Amino acid sequence: MSFSLNALYKNTSWAIGQQSAKLAALQEKAGTGQEVNRVSDDPNVANQILGLTSDNRTKEQYLKNLDELSSMLDLSSSVLQSMTTELTRARSSMTSIVSGTTSDQTRQTLATDLDNALEQLISLANTQRLGQSLFAGAKTGTTPYTVERNSNGEITRVIYQGSTQENAVEVAKGVTISGVLAGPALFSVDDRQSPVFYGQTGAAAGSGTSTVRSDVYLQIQGSAGDWQLSIDGGENWVSADGTEDNLAVVNSQTGEVLYVNTTGIKETGTEPIRVPGTYDIFNVLICARDLLKNTQDIPETQLRQMLNDTLTAMKGAEEKLTQSFPVVGGRLQTLSSLRDSIEQTKLSAEDDVSRMQDADIAQVSIDLARYEVLYQMSLAIASKMFSMSFLDFME
């Protein structure tokens, strides 16, 4: 008899404990609205939920990157449009000068306008967003363009100090896109051709590949058999005896080299030289401004030819700048497509998590009521059984 009562007690306690635990679990599901509240509830499903949740956090970071890059590229597009407008206006003014007879005063006025346009272009090229330069490449914290000025405050040289590499950011698994651009790729024409000598000194291009860019002025002094050549305003002179067909003349300020054939030199003077295919939107305006001011006293015939060639160079620089719009537009379109794709997969993953994690409240309510009844019945039975005495059996 004692064995039977002991077994009955254990079985009843076990049943009450099981029903109590089930009630607690159902009450937790009803309170949280979730089928799985901890890993132990269902390790397999919990592992799937954790994986999907982690993947969604990664997608959220991708979406933040996409938003940041889109904002950068939108601003870049606006800045590039302003720069194109400024350069187009400058070229239009130059066209009117080249196509007709103009006074020196008119040329001086246009030179001032070009100087203002140059200042504006540099300011736009140095545009930043939240401390990041739009056109500095990977060196986003660097001001991409610095300038050198003469004693009159005029810009004589524009120097790029950013990176030629872009700052790629991951926007999807295995996909990177840069929201910042490298200035030279947008603003510089890279199609170097042989230097063109405009003067009458007899100097000509050597066989070496010169590194000078845009317009250069070669100064020649001395006499036959003992020439002195300079391309940096007389800061550095190179001696020539007239037999060198590939003499390197170095600019001591920039390190650029001009290779000169000296065999045909016949007189001293200043030789205007132009290197087609090496202009950017900055130095082409500097060259045009200096030609209009004619500080080198170039004869009118040569000056007109050089102004006409400068106009051609300005058109090339403008076309190069215009080519940036498809680049920026293509990236914006790619970012938009990626955003749609990532948002769609993120929503799908959220639906999967919801399906696995969210509890069926109606079913939980039914189960909760059923187990509440069973629990109360078990308590009532246990109370009745455990209140029995020996006298109950005597009856």
Image (cartoon, rainbow, N blue to C red):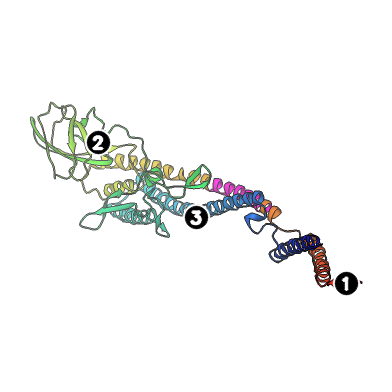
Q: Residues within 10 Å of mark 2 (few under 14, many from 20)?
A: many
- Amino acid tagged 2: Tyr
Q: Picture quarter containing residue 203?
A: top left
Q: Is residue 155 above or below residue 278?
A: below
- Amino acid tagged 1: Asp
| Residue 123 seen in this snapshot | yes
Residue 211 screen position, x and y as percent: 26, 37
N-terminal label among 2 and 3: 3
Q: Which residue is mark 3?
A: 68
Q: Secondary structure at mark 1?
A: helix
The magenta span reads 332-351
Q: Give the mark toward the camera: 2 or 1.
A: 1
Q: Which residue is mark 2?
A: 198
Q: Nearer the viewer, residue 128 or 193?
A: 128
Residue 192 screen position, x and y as percent: 33, 34
Q: Residue 44 magenta-drawn?
A: no
- Amino acid tagged 3: Glu
Q: Residue at x 28, y 38 (%)?
A: 274
Q: Which mark is residue 103?
A: none
Q: Which residue is mark 1?
A: 392
Contact, CB < 8 Å: mark 2 with mark 1?
no
Q: Give the mark toward the camera: 1 or 3.
A: 1
Q: Secondary structure at mark 3?
A: helix
Q: Nearer the viewer, residue 27 or 340?
A: 27
Going by the picture, which residue comes out furthest to the right? 395
Drawn side of residue 352 relative to residue 267, left or right? right
N-terminal label among 1 and 3: 3
Q: Separation of disc 1 and disc 3 at Cα?
A: 82 Å
Q: Picture quarter containing residue 229?
A: top left
